[in-house]
Image (cartoon, coloured by chain):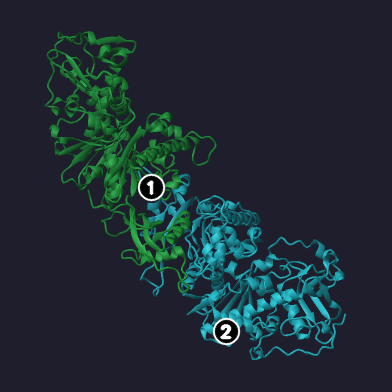
Chain colours: A cyan, B green
Amino acid sequence: MDKITSLIHLLPVAAPPPSLKDNTGDLDRLQRAIRSLPGFAACPLVIPYRRQAVLAANFRRCGFQGVALLNELALTVNGKSREKGAGATSACWQLVDFLSTIPARLPAMALDLGTTHLAAVLLDLLNGQELACATRVNSQTAYGADILSRIHFAAVKDGEEDTGGGLARLHGAVIADINTLAGQLAKTAGLPPGAIRAMSVAGNTAMSHLFLGLNPYHLCREPYIPVVNAPAPVAAVELGLDIHPAALVHVLPGVGSYFGGDLLAGIVACDLDLAGEPAMLIDVGTNAEVVVGCRDWLMACAGAAGPALEGGVAEMGMRAGIGVIERVSIDPVSAELAFTVITEDLASDLTSNSRSCSGSASATDVRDNRNHRPKARGICGSGIIDLMAELFLAGMIDVRGKFRPKRMGARLVARPDGPAFVVARPEEAVGGKAVEVSQLDLDALMRSKAAMYAVLSTLMEQLGLPFSALKQIYVAGAFGRRIDPRQAVVLGMIPDLPLATYRSVGNSSLAGAGRYLLSAAARERVRAAAKKTTYLELNVNHEFMLRFSGARFIPHTDRRLFPSVPRPDESENRKVND
Amino acid sequence: MDKITSLIHLLPVAAPPPSLKDNTGDLDRLQRAIRSLPGFAACPLVIPYRRQAVLAANFRRCGFQGVALLNELALTVNGKSREKGAGATSACWQLVDFLSTIPARLPAMALDLGTTHLAAVLLDLLNGQELACATRVNSQTAYGADILSRIHFAAVKDGEEDTGGGLARLHGAVIADINTLAGQLAKTAGLPPGAIRAMSVAGNTAMSHLFLGLNPYHLCREPYIPVVNAPAPVAAVELGLDIHPAALVHVLPGVGSYFGGDLLAGIVACDLDLAGEPAMLIDVGTNAEVVVGCRDWLMACAGAAGPALEGGVAEMGMRAGIGVIERVSIDPVSAELAFTVITEDLASDLTSNSRSCSGSASATDVRDNRNHRPKARGICGSGIIDLMAELFLAGMIDVRGKFRPKRMGARLVARPDGPAFVVARPEEAVGGKAVEVSQLDLDALMRSKAAMYAVLSTLMEQLGLPFSALKQIYVAGAFGRRIDPRQAVVLGMIPDLPLATYRSVGNSSLAGAGRYLLSAAARERVRAAAKKTTYLELNVNHEFMLRFSGARFIPHTDRRLFPSVPRPDESENRKVND
């Protein structure tokens, strides 16, 4: 971590008290005192209208001596200055409060604004310490599970001008969620929510638009243009956030409609922008985003594979949580199946390096029988990936991902929507309800894995680099945390590289948002990465569609791409031992 | 008038339309296009949060070509730069709207925020033309007639924090008044109020505080410190003003608690700050303010004489208006009295050079008898000054301003509160009610005139200059417009200088507020004048009290100061001829 250079400056100030000889106004006096300090002489100082009265009152109450609280309000200036061609920023401070002394803590909230989940940490800007963390479901899901349906809902009008009724409702829903999170964080830290003095927000472009009350209408329409890529900081009070009203909310910039501040945060959290050799970051949340790069260049793509990956990897079956099957193994000889369920809480998937977080999943009916193996209540994406790889290696599905009924025995059952495979039998499952994976589920995963590989290979093709050029592949999010890279390689979802190449990095979006709050260098890196990143639009990329087709086999039509994946026993006469 | 360099910049912009190769966000695209224009490359651009959605929508609707509307948002920078020691300002623009073409008109409102009256003009920022003017009474008078009583009322709490209940009510009252004025101006100009894109406000420090919702508590308490002398511009929407929500409201800076933006506006309107030789500006409204200076220095004082002058000159009898006696003459030989009443409307007193304005005074019962001399319904300050000077010259009052009963005849009547002089007999008055001036009225005027002369002479004493050093004395406001300088000299209210020295300048506060909207040079001059002005606090000035005593005689205890004023016939045996 860089030196702590937070978005808030606490500046000890001692002004001469007013006298008949010096009738300067309170606020002018305060500004004059600040400008007399080294480094502030020529610095623009802005006092927001709503802060004037309280600022003057606090300054007086402190006897004109104490600590001025300044928010960094970087103004982008397209200077010929400093950086080679890139836009520079000019320091500008917003003077918002006056305290009697340096406070014991200076809490700020970093938020990962996910399509499905919100995750937040409360950091102390004085020392970088984590004070609390919390997660919750994004209530916008009530208006649409995925980004596209929310963009459509945002366009629903109900009489309002500029902001449609749908937009206002989506905006209101996420603001209410964030207020709940802020309340939880503050409570954990033993503070009032009003003590939170700053916020950073890393989200995909659509979520950032909805958060700011901006209509995302054009995001999903060619040529896919956001209202704004680099929004200016906004006072919390203007957004209706129940933290300190003068807290500035910094929405991390994005690069394009399908490449938001969450991925830029991830780039900085993984130090991808500092890497000496090319590395890759894969972030599969509700959406899928990939970036390849190093300190000299960055190229990214995202979104095109979204719907398939969303439905197939992160959404299939159910979300990771207590009692959900995350690992499956099938003995290739005996065909015996074993599974393990998740026994820790969801929140640890959503906040990185946060072991103390408590989420909302209920553990009651799963752990009621502590002496026995925990019962299953469903299967999540990583469980299905495990299952499918094991089924393939055991010769129970073919290269197209289709069940081979003669190899499957009694675990294969007929359902109205087609055949399904029983992963957890009724006696192993919560409520006696078997956990099954259908052919339709596997078909969805096939599309997802094909899309993922097509995204990765199209991107490398554009760069003219082989996968072997990548020394490190960071896999972010719940996907990175839960998935077994070996199984994903078997399926042909990710390239066949040494497993040490893959590294799970947790919630890199949240980690990056936290660094944004704490470090000026990180903020500059986010801005520089936004400018440096070339965005590859896959929605209109024909190469991608060709690669998608080739990837719809296990592991691939071109087997030379996956030398480590064995050819399973393809004979038809072995059966599952049950 | 300087070259028109208004507070709003209309900038023709043609941005390349979005494409798959150029996925810059709408607002980033607009900013990039502006930054590519000469002079804007390194200029900070701010987009207020609430303008983002509408700005992007308008930019799109115009096909990414048209006219960007930018508000000047000067940031004060205490640089060692440019000006010798003084604070410089750094240009900063607020990007608030996008239009398809340059509009036909660009209306902005200049406001004289008086304690008793508000006066406004609507100017076209494109050419400086006056589109409309209007005046009205300040509704805050319902909460207190003078500044002190309003400051006390502002401190009345009713449960709110920071802003007391009284403060909120005073703020709300004046905002409602201004909204009414804005509606009138817009209607006259044939525009919606939302077409008004900027506002400048010149008021005394207390009125400026109440307008901004700032508590003026410390203004009237030693050492008399304002919350702010130089407030930052505020968006109209934040103040609750019903003009364009993004219109910036510029409150002209003040120098001290008793020296506000109204007087700085006056200084610039009279070009006092450019004068080669010392000149003086006297502004007597509800309060009295005086400034002496030239291009090299400015010294001002105000307020101390306020209550006396308010009660005595501007408030005594009644305010100037149709049917009010403004001129009185008494033949020193025959003692015959003649008077003239005001036949034009009040508004022309309040807006300078504005002959088209219509005020609210009713002319019905005054002009019902057009073939006769108009009847009187009262007497205003200038009428009483005329009367008193004439009474003195006719030997009917003594040097202390006391009636000399033996010289007055039947016009002297006895009232419960003491003797009074009949100016208009019942048959000459509206409703048959005689217009009288009592000894108490004259006593009040004596205090007022003594205070005025004491203020002027204390100020000159501080400067070490004789009155004869003043080549010009500008007399602003209704006082300047109505008063006969010769009569004021006779009373010893103003110095005995050639009458050509005195020049009535109308509402210089309003004129200066208008220039502030139209000219960057005027804005810089206002800021420079604020820094250059030395403020003399009379509330604690013992010299002033001594001078006040000496001035409580007509014309003065030291007759050498008024060589042009004759000694009236002091014999006791002449009577008024009636």
Q: Chain of mark 1?
A: B
Rendered view: A78 above or below B288: below
Q: Position of residue A78 (x, y in %)?
A: 38, 67
The residue lying at 57 percent from left, 65 percent from top is A203
Q: Nearer the viewer, residue A466 or B101?
A: B101
Which residue in the structure is indicated by mark 2? A470
Residue B253 appears in the figure: no
Q: Position of residue B317 (x, y in %)?
A: 30, 22
Q: Disc 1 versus disc 2: distance between alpha carbons?
A: 59 Å
Of badges 1 and 2, nearer the viewer stands 1
Rendered view: A15 above or below A523: above
Q: Which SS class for mark 2?
A: loop
The residue lying at 48 percent from left, 57 percent from top is B53
In which quarter of the view is residue B268 placed?
A: top left
Q: Nearer the viewer, residue B95 or A239?
A: B95
Answer left or right for B409 relative to A192.
left
Q: Position of residue A21 (x, y in %)?
A: 32, 43
Q: Which mark is residue B195?
A: 1
Q: Which SS class for mark 1?
A: helix
Q: Nearer the viewer, residue A308 or A231?
A: A308
In which quarter of the view is residue B121 placed?
A: top left
Rendered view: B314 above or below A20: above
The residue lying at 49 percent from left, 37 percent from top is B164
Q: Residues within 10 Å of mark 1 (few under 14, many from 20)?
A: some
Q: Amino acid at mark 2?
A: Leu
